[in-house]
């Protein structure tokens, strides 16, 4: 992907400038759309951007949405580092949630108490990794586009989750297609808030991502592979091995996001559990420029927007779906920004062969 090439090549200053410019441009264009609806854009943006941070309870709601976005965003960042595109976060969340539920409603979970959550997280990571590994296998063995395969796998995973809540995992005591509640849940961190220990798992994932990418040979080789396939081959780095590894790690992260959604928020498996977290994670990774701090800040922004969109709809009448438009505009302007950056870079540093001519 040319976008990922540009991200790898750009300096920290250029990345920050493009990100801020993309967000500002998206808000400006979004304000024009809101004005067409005869609504004051400043009022709408107040409820969308500022109101979510005004109370401790609302911050707790932001944290609930932040956790899956951040974990998926970190997983996606692993593949982006290797210049791969894992767009299958939604499906991998679903598989992770299924794995967590299988463990959580079993007699084993009831017998060992809250410790089951550790086994559930491990199971969810394996389920998510294997699901992403399918796309990785087709990429390495048949050179199939991982963009297409991960998107197709999303549809299969969503339908498989629906099958599970209607049949094998359905709660026999209820009439609604959902599983029974898991044996126990992640503890709440504060009274009067839905913030739970899932935020600690997400922050642990952030630390792991930073250590792996910056301090290990695995992370270094992923970055080399993302920078230049020829350089990676010259250095003895196996393209197939690290492509597959990146997809497995990315899927494991998304699977854990699904597990935390079960144990921390929903308490049971139900349809629509993944929501838009898969796409939000991709946006967070791009907006954060694959940097740990950047992905964190971007995830907080997206979580706040998601939380504020509902309030904005109630108070101003602007549909919460406007958030999808805003996110799409941000991605569009990031693409345009790096497209300009790539073109400008080529003009500034022309190919040496052309200079010789």
Image (cartoon, rainbow, N blue to C red):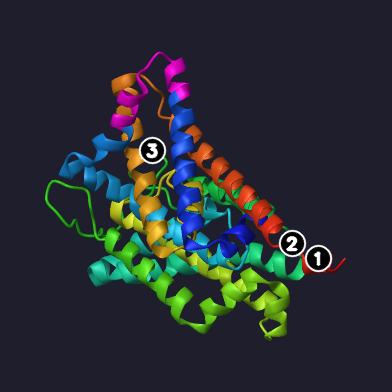
Q: Quadrant of residue 308?
A: top left
Q: Earlier in the sequence, mark 2 or mark 1?
A: 2
Q: Magenta span has 45?
A: yes
Q: Residue 86 appears at what percent x and percent y?
A: 58, 58
| Disc 2 from disc 1: Cα separation | 7 Å
Q: Position of residue 179 (x, y in %)?
A: 38, 49
Determine contact: label 2, label 3, CB under 8 Å: no
**Span colored in magenta:** 32-47
Taking the image as shown, residue 42 lies to the left or right of residue 33, namely left
Query: Quick one: 189 or 342, which is closer to the camera?
Result: 342
- The quarter of the picture where residue 9 lies is bottom right
The residue where tag 3 is placed is 176
155 horizontally vs 192: left or right: right
Pick whichever of labels 2 and 3 is earlier in the sequence. 3
**Residue drawn at (84%, 69%) of the image:** 356
- Asked if the magenta segment contains residue 49, the reply would be no
The residue beneath circle 2 is 350
Residue found at x 64% / y 73%: 225
């Amino acid at each position: 992907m040319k976008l990922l090439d540009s991200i790898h090549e750009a300096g920290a200053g250029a990345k920050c400038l493009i990100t801020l410019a993309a967000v500002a441009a998206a808000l400006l264009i979004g304000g024009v759309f809101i004005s067409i609806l005869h609504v004051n854009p400043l009022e709408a943006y107040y409820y969308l951007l500022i109101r979510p941070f005004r109370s401790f309870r609302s911050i707790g709601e932001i944290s609930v949405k932040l956790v899956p976005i951040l974990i998926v965003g970190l997983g996606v960042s692993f593949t982006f580092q290797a210049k791969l595109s894992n767009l299958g976060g939604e499906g991998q969340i679903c598989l992770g949630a299924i794995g967590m539920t299988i463990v959580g409603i079993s007699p084993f979970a009831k017998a060992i108490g809250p410790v089951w959550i550790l086994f559930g997280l491990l199971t969810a990571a394996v389920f998510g990794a294997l699901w992403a590994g399918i796309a990785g296998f087709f990429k390495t063995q048949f050179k199939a586009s991982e963009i297409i395969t991960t998107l197709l796998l999303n549809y299969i995973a969503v339908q498989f989750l629906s099958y599970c809540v209607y049949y094998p995992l359905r709660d026999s005591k209820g009439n609604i297609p959902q599983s029974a509640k898991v044996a126990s849940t992640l503890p709440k961190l504060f009274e009067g808030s839905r913030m739970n220990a899932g935020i600690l798992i997400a922050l642990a994932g952030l630390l792991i991502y930073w250590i792996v990418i910056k301090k290990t040979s695995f992370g270094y080789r992923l970055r080399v592979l993302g920078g230049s396939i020829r350089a990676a081959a010259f250095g003895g780095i196996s393209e197939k091995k690290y492509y597959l590894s990146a997809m497995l790690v990315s899927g494991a992260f998304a699977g854990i996001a699904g597990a935390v959604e079960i144990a921390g928020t929903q308490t049971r498996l139900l349809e629509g559990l993944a929501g838009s977290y898969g796409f939000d994670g991709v946006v967070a990774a791009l907006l954060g420029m694959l940097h740990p701090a950047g992905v964190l800040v971007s995830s907080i922004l997206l979580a706040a927007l998601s939380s504020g969109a509902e309030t904005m709809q109630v108070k101003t009448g602007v549909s919460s779906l406007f958030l999808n438009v805003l996110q799409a505009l941000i991605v569009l302007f990031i693409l345009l920004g790096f497209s300009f950056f790539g073109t400008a870079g080529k003009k500034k540093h022309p190919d040496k062969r052309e200079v010789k001519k």
